[in-house]
Amino acid sequence: MADRGSLEAAQEILRTHFGYDRFRPGQEAVVRAVLAGRDALAVMPTGAGKSICYQVPAVVLPGLTVVVSPLVSLMADQVRSLKEAGVRGSYLNSTLTPAQQSEVLARARAGAYDVMYVAPERLADPRFVQFAAEAAIPFVAVDEAHCVSQWGQDFRPSYLAVGDFIAALPTRPVVAALTATATERVRADIVRLLGLREPALTVTGFDRPNLRFAVERCEARRKTARLDAFIDERQAESGIVYCAKRATVEEVCDHLRERGIAVTRYHAGLSAAERERNQRAFVADNAPVMVATNAFGMGIDKSNVSYVVHYNMPGSVEAYYQEAGRAGRDGSPADCLLLWCDADIATGRFFIEQESSNEALTPEEAEVVRAGRRRMLEAMVGYCYTTDCLRRYLLRYFGEGVGTTGAPQEVTLSGGERCCSNCAGEMEVVDVTAEARAVMRCVHELRGRFGKTVVVDVLRGADTEAIRSRGLSRAAAYGSCKAARPLLMEVVELLAAGDYLTITEGKYPVVCAGGRYREAARDDFRLLMKRLPAKTARAAVPKAT
Ligand code: ADP
């Protein structure tokens, strides 16, 4: 336990230097652990206040706290605001001249700083390693710690040096890792690769009770009509419509403008001046509706955004939750609607294959990164398909409810109408277990050599060229399930989202076994699918109240 004195000192510093009355619950848990000499892993969403978790201990502890961060462009600002708070901060990165760097190191040697921000690359620089070996470093904080994992969204090979750096210090410091990304796998990587020792795990702040979540499957050609109905119910309110592609942003923005809505747009294809102008128009409510790609939103603090519509499915639950979370910052009820169709899944898969990463990765590393992204995409597809509470799905994904002991606890939920479209019973739930078993038997028999279309054609006993030329009409599964084609296609996607099957990428994707393949053969296997009842499919989702 942190001794009473140091915790009181921390609270005092929080008040006097930073001007906050009290720690947020997650912050206190991390600060307590660090002051007690225990490593910590903190998983908190953006905006939850991760910085305080290391800035306050940095002031309490004697010696120099090293903060590893990939955000080089923000370091100068961070240090400036620390100085305003009366904290002796510094940073060392490539924006400084060699002479400036020497000066920072000399001053640090003389004990002039409480905190030093460095980029991970710096930890491999012999001059810095030499400095660190001689300095008293009681505490190392690793911000954006998910960058160490190849399974995360932003893998950076340079983060792999952090663990070695810590291990090579003459006295092992306390280490705190902080991130907003929290899949089990990424979390395990952080602990292993940074060499955390029995870290206190803190996961907090993901629930946003005032947000109402809704998911609707909506074919591409019907999306504009659906969006119109949604926005018409929310005239004079401010909202964001996220699209996957720049071209879609243009189309949707033009369409809304023609309908007389004060709308603006944002994507990386616009000039910096226009982006700036449009963003300002949105924040000032001159154009209360923003249509944008995921390039929009970082650092935007607009409190009265009352809805976020995703016009396409994003590539990960992390991205979705971060974007949807821009609604309802003022605490008022707000709506988060996700519209999706099969084409969105295909686009997501295409993006993964096309994407080149920000740092030079070896082909093997790049493949591991892609595999990680495929899993993240499947989790997103799982969100679209789940018949369970959407909020519960999100909170489970981020591991909320896991206490510092690591024991899972039940997630608390608001439930009912205001919770999500599933809890409100807007969806009809259909049991597709029989169809799913037929699909699994068919994929097994075809030994994962064919794509979705062939699998479904075999099941339905179709007479196509592909079936004839491969002699597939002799398969035992041929004609074994006469369910409608779109339903079977959906069952295949649902099985892939649940990891019972895998759909590979590339030019000729095939359907093959997934990680939970065997579970689908068990007696208690059930597969449920949700659908919008035909009657309500065209009606608008009730507005948040
Ligand atoms: P993160 O790094 O998790 O995205 P920040 O550290 O930038 O978040 O903090 C987000 C915001 O929360 C900041 O504006 C900060 O001033 C505020 N904040 C942090 N801790 C507290 C606190 N204990 N009480 C009130 N506001 C806080």
Image (spheres, grey):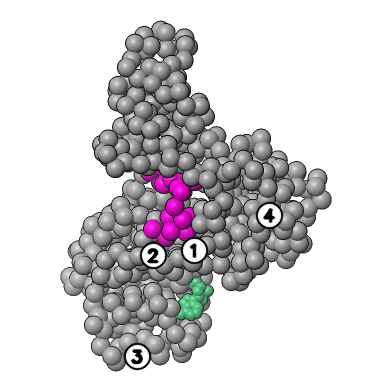
Q: Residue 290 carries which label?
A: 4
Indicate the secondary structure of the residue bearing disc 1. loop
The span shown in magenta is 374-396
Q: In this view, does 501 lie above or below 4?
A: above
Mark 2 CB near ligand 1 (8 Å cut): no
Asked whether 262 or 66 is in front, the reply is 262
Q: Residue 415 carries which label?
A: 1
Residue depicted at 26% across the width and 66% down the height: 407
* Crowd tier of the residue under label 3, counting other residues whose Cα lies within 10 Å: few below 14, some 14–19, many 20 or above: few
| Spot occupied by residue 154 in the image (x, y as percentages of width and height) | 41, 51
For disc 2, the marked residue is 411
Residue 432 image-quadrant placement: top left
- The kind of residue tagged 4 is Met
Mark closer to the observer (4, 2) = 2
* Crowd tier of the residue under label 1, counting other residues whose Cα lies within 10 Å: few below 14, some 14–19, many 20 or above: some
| Spot occupied by residue 45 in the image (x, y as percentages of width and height) | 45, 64
Q: Can residue 505 be seen in this view?
A: yes
Answer with left or right where residue 249 lies relative to residue 94.
right
